[in-house]
Amino acid sequence: MLIRLNNIHHPTTIDEAIHLLTERNTRPLYGGVALHRESPTHVTAVVDLSKLKLNRHRVFDAGFSLGSMMTLEKAHQTCLELAEKIPNAKFLAEMLRLEAPINQRNTLTIGDVLVEQRPNSILLTALTALDAQVDANGWPRFIHDWLTAPKPEIQQALITEIALEKGSPTARHAFEKVARTPADDPIVGAVGYLDRDANGKLHDVRLALCGVADHPIPLGAVDEILIETNGDVDRALAALKLDPPSDHWGSREYRVEMAKVLIQRTLSYCKDGC
């Protein structure tokens, strides 16, 4: 509950909303789920974004975008509609489905997920692997930069959309996880995007992990070695540097070992399918 809430703003333009969010103790209201879960006691005003038309998608030459006010279910259906022509949309549709059950997907928005930043979010891990860009306050930045930005900045920025490349039609996507049950959130999860050229050589590799830090992380050093060696997994894993937390779901050592296993599974899937 927002126990000190006494004002709800209803801006009609992006610039007006950005200006309102510079006020002290004011937060944006996407679907409201993230703010409700957090229930910050200091927030005295929220900015209703419903008049800003941020619940739409765009398709452009290099890719597509999803508005911050789109529910996960609407984004899921949109990605299914785009799947025939946009490979990354087809994969993202599945990641959106796995992010939350249908009742939550009908209320949770893209903006909520980007603000909440759950460390084991399947959707955020996929967006990290696919080098998505978050547009906030008119400034696009890669998802990893967004996830490592100061928390106050994240909470008061106006997210308008998240954009992705279309992806290669020859690329393979993969998601692997370890969890308490198949339906549970990942304890550790891995997402991979891998593409080969006409000669069968790897030329684009993007891996990301969740459950090994306080947010999903890209594996740039591992990606580079895989490309340089055309898929030498042992050499690539030697470059993997992780320091995950220990908790009741798994120790640091368990998470490190599972990360290696999941990376191998992801790469094995691509090798079999590419």
Image: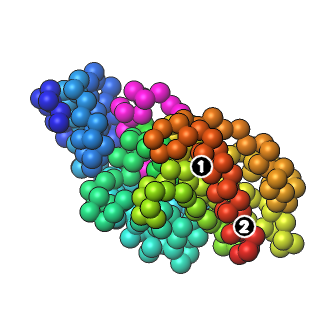
Q: Looking at the image, which is closer to me, 112 or 58?
A: 112
Q: Is residue 130 above or below residue 114?
A: below
- Mark 1 lies on a secondary structure that is strand
Instruction: Determine whether, in the image, residue 48 is placed left or right of residue 271.
Output: left
Q: Is residue 218 above or below residue 96?
A: above
Image-quadrant location for residue 206: bottom right
Tag 2: amino acid = Ser
The residue at the point 48 percent across, 68 percent down is 94
Residue at the extreme top of the image, as rendered: 24
Quarter holding the N terminus?
Answer: top left
Give the mark, 2 or 1, whose residue is nearer the N terminus: 1
For disc 1, the marked residue is 209
The residue at the point 54 percent across, 57 percent down is 178
The residue at the point 47 percent across, 27 percent down is 150
- Magenta stretch bounds: 148-164
Distance from the alpha carbon under mark 2 to that under mark 1: 16 Å
One can see residue 174 in this view:
yes
Quarter holding the C terminus?
Answer: bottom right
Q: Is residue 229 above or below residue 256?
A: below
Instruction: Determine whether, in the image, residue 1 is placed left or right of residue 171.
Output: left
Image-quadrant location for residue 29: top left
Where is residue 104 drawn, in percent x and y? 29, 58
Tag 1: amino acid = Leu
Where is residue 242 drawn, in percent x and y? 66, 38
As for residue 149 lying within the magenta part, the answer is yes
Image-quadrant location for residue 197: bottom right
The residue at the point 38 percent across, 52 percent down is 110
- Mark 2 lies on a secondary structure that is helix
For disc 2, the marked residue is 268
One can see residue 217 in this view:
no
Where is residue 155 drawn, in percent x and y? 37, 33
